Amino acid sequence: MPRTKPNIIITGTPGVGKTTLCESLTGTTDLKHLAINRVAKERGCHAGWDDALNSWVVDEDKILDAIENEVEQGGYLIDWHACDLFPESWIDLVIVLRSNSTTLYDRLKARNYPEQKLQENMDAEIMEVLLDEAREAFQAELVVELQSNTSEEMEGNTSRIETWVGQWTHERCNEAAPHTHNP
C-alpha cells in the first residue's frame, strides 16, 4: 500500500539544527519526529557507550529492524547524522543541513563536546562528508542542501519543507483518487 505521508531524512553534522528543525516541523506538519539516537538508546540498538566520543555506538542493522514497520507506513522526520543506511525505498526527501564553521564551532563548544569529537565534527562539516554521503546514497532530486546558521534561515527551512510536504501529499491524494470518465 502506498504511503500517504512522506518520510524525510533530516541529516547533517551534529550542531547544525536537525533536532530543532524536526521539532519545528512536527508542530506544523502531520509528521512525527524519529530521533535515531533516542531509538538506539531506548530500544537497545547499540553496541555500548564510547567514552572517547561521549556517545552510543549505534548498531545500524538493529536500528533498521527496530524502525522498519513504522517508517514503511510513512509520516516520519528521521533525525540523524547519517543517511546512507536507510533504504531509498523508505525515503521521499533528504535534507542536509549545513552551517558555517564559526557558528558550528560555537554550538558544539556550548554542548561541551570533547575536543576530539568537536574536531571530527568540524572536519566532517568542512569536508562536506554528510552532503557527499547523501548524494552518493540517494537520487539527486531527493537531496536538498539547506543552510542553518540563523533563526531566519531556520524559519525559511521550516517553511520550505512545509510547502514540499503539502505538495507531496496533494500529489499522492490526487493519484489515489478514483478517476471518473464522462460518457
Image (spheres, helix red, strand yellow):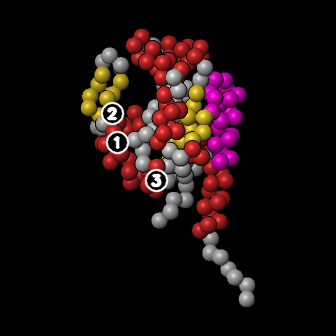
56 to 72, vertically: above or below: above
Q: Is residue 152 magenta?
A: yes
> Dots 1 and 2: beta carbons under 8 Å?
yes
Name the residue located 56 percent from the left edge and 13 percent from the top edge: 106
Residue extending furthest toward the top: 115
2 or 3: tag closer to the N-terminus:
2
Dot 3 amino acid type: Ser
Mark 1 — residue? 63
The residue wearing badge 3 is 89
- Residue type (three-letter) at the residue carrying disc 1: Ile
The number of discs equals 3
**Farthest residue toward the bottom?**
183
Does residue 147 belong to the magenta stretch? Answer: yes
Front of the two marks 2 and 3:
3
Q: Nearer the viewer, mark 1 or mark 3?
A: 3
**Of callouts 1 and 3, which one flags the residue occurring earlier in the amino acid sequence?**
1
Q: Nearer the viewer, residue 2 or 41?
A: 2
Horizontal and vertical percent position of residue 17? 56, 28
Say which residue label 2 marks: 58
